[in-house]
Amino acid sequence: MAAVTIDLTLYCENARLLAEFWKAALGYVDEIPASRFGTDEEPFDRFDLPAGGDEDGALLCDPEGIGPRLSIVRVPDRGRTDNRLHIDVRVPGEGSPADRWERIRMEAARLVRAGGTILEAFDDYILMADPEGNEFRVTAAPA
């Protein structure tokens, strides 16, 4: 049996804004439909993404093919889709707890410059929000 993989879906009001933020945060790129699928419409049908254009959705991928795909979908009624995706942004590297905390702090500062907001700092992670308020954590990768 092959290893299980996942795709992540994030509902939003402004797909382009969040796509640009998450590309900056994760180093992801826009997935080019023709690279994996026969037609431009096929990936949208396969992953339940709207085919209306960039303002309605985005499909992002890890350029190395390691991380999960991130589907970002605009929904007209936030009340219907209050489930929000929680993402952990894990900074790499080893070292002392102080070294790891410094890398977490530096990554959080970079994400603030990209449009994120720091909500609260804890012992081993920083709770942040993307430009639309979706919460995520900046933490260190397991040692």
Image (cartoon, rainbow, N blue to C red):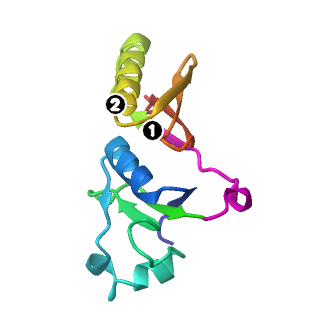
Q: Is residue 74 left or right of residue 32?
A: right
In this view, the mark in front (2 or 1): 2
Q: Is residue 133 left or right of residue 96?
A: right
SS class of the residue under badge 1?
Answer: strand
Q: Position of residue 12 (x, y in %)?
A: 55, 56
Which residue shows up at 36% across the image and 45% down it?
26
Q: Position of residue 39 (x, y in %)?
A: 33, 88
Mark 2 touches mark 1? (CB < 8 Å): no
Q: Quadrant of residue 86?
A: top right
Q: Give the crowd class for mark 2: few <14, some 14-19, many >=20 residues within 10 Å.
A: few
Q: CA distance from mark 2 to mark 1?
A: 16 Å
Say if the magenta span includes residue 14. no
Q: Quadrant of residue 31?
A: bottom left
Instruction: Give the farthest residue toward the top.
Output: 98
Region in magenta:
76-88
Which residue is under mark 2? 113
Q: Amino acid at mark 2?
A: Arg
Q: Earlier in the sequence, mark 2 or mark 1?
A: 1
Which residue is under mark 1? 89
Q: Which mark is residue 104?
A: none
Q: Amino acid at mark 1?
A: Val
In the image, 118 versus 47, the foreground residue is 118
Which residue shows up at 45% across the image and 38% down it?
89
